[in-house]
Amino acid sequence: MIGIGSTNIYIDTPRLSREELEEYSKSLFEEWEAYVQAHLQLSDYSLALSVEDGSVKTLGKIGVGLYALYIGIGQYGSFISGVQILKQQVSDASEYLGRLSVEPFSNEIITPKIQKRGEALTRLEGIFKKVERGEITTMEAMDESKLIFGGFEDVPAFFEGLEDALNDVPIHPHEDQLQLIFPDEEPIPIEKMPTSKRQRSPEQPMPPVDHYRVEVWRDSRKDQLNVRVSKA
C-alpha cells in the first residue's frame, strides 16, 4: 500500500486504563472509518490507527494500492485535478480524525497537538510544481515518481497517464500556477479548551505503571478488522 495521508495526535490527558484505551481506540477507528467510507472516493484503501497511553498519542494512516489510486484519479478528468481532489479528501479525513480524537476529553484541561501529512500525493504534486518551474525535466519527474509509486510494470496505465500530464504542464520559471491544496505538514486548528487550573493535592511517588498501545487496522475495505493490544 502507498501512504497517502497520516495524522499525528498528542493529547495531554491523564492516562487511561487498558480497558479505557482499548474502548477509546476501537470507537475512534469505527467513527473515522465511517467518515472515510462516505467521503474518500477510492474503490479500496487501508486504514490503520495506533493509540498509546500515558498522554494519549495517536497515529492514523491511510494507504491505497496503485491500481485503485489510478482509477480514483481518473474519475475526475485530468490527472492533476484527480490528484488535488483526492488529496483534499484525504486532508478532510485527517482533520476529522483529529477533531474526533479530542471530543471525549472536552471537559479536560488539555492542549492537543495535531498534524497531518499528505504523504505520496503531496510529494507527487511537488513534482508537478518542479516541472512547472523548469527545475526538472519530464524524464527526471518520472524517475522521482517511480521511487514513490513503484516500477512501471506494476500499473503501466498509471505511469502513462502521469507522463502525459507532466508533458502538458506549462513551464513558468518564476511563478506557481498549480496551487497546493494543503502543505506537507499542517496543524489542525482545535478549539481552545478551558485553561483554569485545578487544585492539586501534593503529589505522592507513584509505582511504575504499564503503558499500552492499541492498534486497530483494516488492510482493505473488505478485509476483517484487526485489533492488537500490547505493552508500549
Image: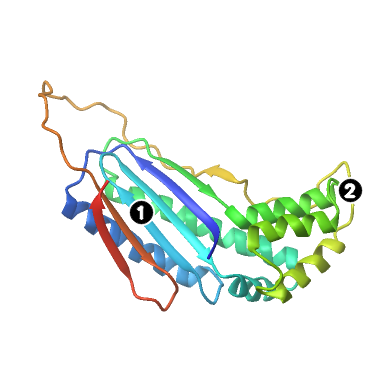
Circle 1 sits on which residue? 50
At label 1, which amino acid type do we have?
Answer: Ser
Q: In the picture, residue 57 is in which quadrant? A: top left
Q: Name the residue rendered at 38%, 57% in the picture.
A: 49
Q: Name the residue rendered at 13%, 23% in the picture.
A: 203
Rendering coords of residue 83 (x, y %): 67, 63
Q: Nearer the viewer, mark 1 or mark 2?
A: 1
Q: Answer left or right for 198 relative to 90.
A: left
* Residue 25 vertical placement versus 115 (above, below): below
| Res. 179 in view | no
Q: Answer left or right for 139 relative to 95.
A: right
The residue lying toward the viewer, choosing from 134 and 40, is: 134
Rendering coords of residue 168 (x, y %): 86, 63
- Pointers 1 and 2 in contact (C-beta within 8 Å): no
> Which is nearer the N-term, disc 1 or disc 2?
1
- Mark 1 is surrounded, within 10 Å at the Cα level, by few (under 14), some (14 to 19) or many (20 or more) other residues, namely many
Circle 2 sits on which residue? 172
At label 2, which amino acid type do we have?
Answer: His
Secondary structure under badge 2? loop
| Res. 8 in view | yes
Rendering coords of residue 86 (x, y %): 61, 64
Q: Name the residue rendered at 11%, 32% in the picture.
A: 207
- Mark 2 is surrounded, within 10 Å at the Cα level, by few (under 14), some (14 to 19) or many (20 or more) other residues, namely some
The residue lying toward the viewer, choosing from 180 and 173, is: 173
Q: Colour scheme of this structure image?
A: rainbow
Q: CA distance from mark 1 to mark 2?
A: 42 Å
Rendering coords of residue 66 (x, y %): 61, 70
Q: In the picture, residue 225 is in which quadrant? A: bottom left
